[in-house]
């Protein structure tokens, strides 16, 4: 069975498994702390309503069989516990089949969450975590050397992530071909980080170099993943450096981190492998069967990647086993933000005492400097960015958000940085206004201390109150 295993990659496997467990931990923690307001029984997009409309075969999930907020919390916190156990190395203490079952558990739990998460879980990194998490089930543990085919399947995922993103850029916005996209991206990205202001203010010639380097990293370097060592390790290392650059420049949930995990699978660390017994026949058969399945399911993602009508972040099977990826096929030139305000006045006027709700991550008060949240994912803040692009992105949930704010809903307010109203005195009216935001200049920053400058554009939602309160009045 020497052809089946790659003992020299034992340390690579260990690093990948522990890193992936950490990503799982953040994913489950995000779910546990945010689900009640987003998809809970009284959430903006309740799971019970969703599963009543969507059959199990289209969205397989434990919550198709039973849902309650308590049961969801149990699953999410159980996912955290299993992820922590994997991070601590419990899978290495179990027999091979036991370790595989332990890795299968977080995948099944997170699949159940994603498949009922609706808009809040429509991001590409959800499917990416599931695809990588499924492959991790077959990486083995200390009882067997890493299987070659699974390591190459991980490189195949990494290739599709990077190459697909590179193709969507060349086919999409002309600024990628003109090397000008980074003149805007750091300012208009969904959730800037603490260094984004400085990245935006880098000299424009350097931005051109960054874009050109990005094209090389995404369109040329991925091919080198399938070359002999040490070229493959060098290609993976270059990808890791690029991803760390992105980590510094913004908040992209765990997208960059799980891409780094994938790249680590291609790095051969200079460490002597321990002695391991020969892989059991049943394990070889299972791994080869899974490899054949992945090869078969890769047809649609590859066809999409090569198509002129390429789409980003699409799953082609309900288990999210093989998906297509991509990011920023188009880049906004102007940043818009929806600012939500409330007032306690009986009759709302323009000069009423309108108080602004503050979000944790999205820009609001121009003086609030962006913070680092990734790999933790602020789902509401991200969707508020989409809502500012077009009201169509917010049609299914924005009205419910306003209703929860009018009720001073505790779970919803926990998603915010600060509510301007005390818990026992909710606002009578809530409104939303659209503003144009831009990063301040060096001079403006020194004079005002504000990193943002904002300009009122138009009304987004007129003053709104609860229907029951309106009927009583």
Image (cartoon, rainbow, N blue to C red):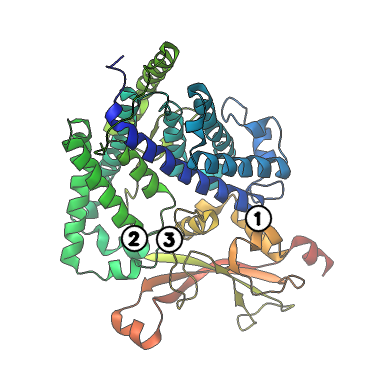
Q: Nearer the viewer, mark 1 or mark 3?
A: 3
Question: Which of 297/374 is in front?
Answer: 374
Residue on which disc 1 sits = 400
Pick whichever of labels 2 and 3 is earlier in the sequence: 3
Residue on which disc 2 sits = 248
Pointer 1 local density, CA inside 10 Å: few below 14, some 14–19, many at least 20: some
Q: Position of residue 333 (x, y in %)?
A: 32, 62
Pick whichever of labels 1 and 3 is earlier in the sequence: 3
Q: Residue at x 29, y 56 (%)?
A: 245
Whether residue 102 sits left or right of residue 11 in the image: it is right
Give me the C-alpha separation between circle 1 and circle 3: 23 Å
Whether residue 298 sits left or right of residue 113 in the image: it is left
Pointer 3 local density, CA inside 10 Å: few below 14, some 14–19, many at least 20: many
The relative height of residue 193 versus residue 31 in the rendered view (above or below) is below
Which residue lies most toward the right here?
Answer: 472
Pick whichever of labels 1 and 2 is earlier in the sequence: 2
Residue on which disc 3 sits = 191
């Amino acid at each position: 069975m020497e052809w089946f295993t790659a003992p020299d990659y034992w340390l690579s496997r260990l690093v990948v498994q522990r890193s992936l467990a950490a990503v799982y931990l953040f994913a489950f923690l995000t779910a546990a702390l945010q689900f009640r307001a987003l998809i809970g029984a009284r959430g903006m997009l309740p799971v019970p309503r969703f599963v009543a409309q969507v059959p199990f075969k289209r969205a397989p999930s434990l919550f198709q069989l039973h849902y309650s907020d308590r049961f969801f919390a149990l699953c999410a916190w159980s996912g955290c516990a299993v992820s922590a156990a994997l991070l601590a190395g419990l899978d290495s203490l179990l027999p091979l089949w036991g370790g595989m079952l332990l890795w299968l558990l977080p995948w099944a739990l997170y699949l159940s969450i994603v498949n009922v998460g609706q808009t809040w879980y429509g991001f590409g990194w959800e499917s990416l975590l599931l695809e990588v998490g499924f492959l991790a089930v077959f990486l083995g543990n200390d009882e067997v050397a890493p299987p070659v085919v699974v390591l190459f399947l991980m490189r195949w995922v990494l290739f599709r992530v990077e190459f697909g993103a590179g193709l969507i850029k060349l086919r999409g916005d002309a600024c990628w071909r003109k090397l000008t996209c980074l003149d805007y991206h750091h300012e208009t990205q969904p959730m800037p980080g603490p260094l984004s202001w400085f990245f935006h203010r880098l000299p424009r010639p350097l931005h051109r170099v960054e874009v050109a380097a990005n094209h090389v990293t995404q369109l040329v370097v991925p091919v080198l993943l399938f070359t002999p060592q040490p070229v493959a390790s060098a290609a993976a290392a270059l990808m890791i450096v690029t991803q760390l650059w992105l980590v510094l420049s913004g908040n992209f949930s765990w997208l960059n981190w799980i891409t780094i995990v994938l790249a680590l699978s291609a790095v051969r660390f200079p460490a002597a492998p321990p002695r391991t017994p020969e892989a059991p026949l049943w394990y070889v058969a299972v791994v080869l069967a899974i490899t054949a399945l992945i090869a078969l399911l890769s047809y649609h993602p590859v066809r999409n990647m090569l198509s002129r009508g390429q789409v980003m972040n699409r799953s082609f099977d309900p288990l999210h086993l093989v998906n297509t990826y991509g990011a920023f096929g188009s880049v906004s030139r102007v940043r818009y933000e929806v600012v939500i305000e409330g007032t306690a006045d009986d009759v709302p006027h323009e000069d009423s005492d309108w108080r602004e709700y503050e979000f944790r991550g999205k820009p609001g008060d121009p003086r609030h400097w962006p913070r680092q949240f990734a790999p933790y994912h602020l789902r509401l803040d991200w969707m508020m960015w989409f809502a500012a692009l077009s009201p169509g992105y917010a049609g299914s949930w924005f009205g419910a958000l306003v209703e929860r704010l009018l009720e001073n809903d505790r779970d919803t307010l926990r998603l915010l940085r600060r509510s301007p109203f005390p818990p026992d005195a909710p606002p009578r009216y809530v409104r939303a206004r659209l503003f144009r935001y831009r990063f301040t200049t060096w001079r403006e920053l020194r004079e005002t201390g504000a990193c943002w400058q904002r300009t009122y554009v138009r009304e987004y939602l007129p003053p709104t109150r609860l229907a029951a309160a309106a009927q009583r009045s």
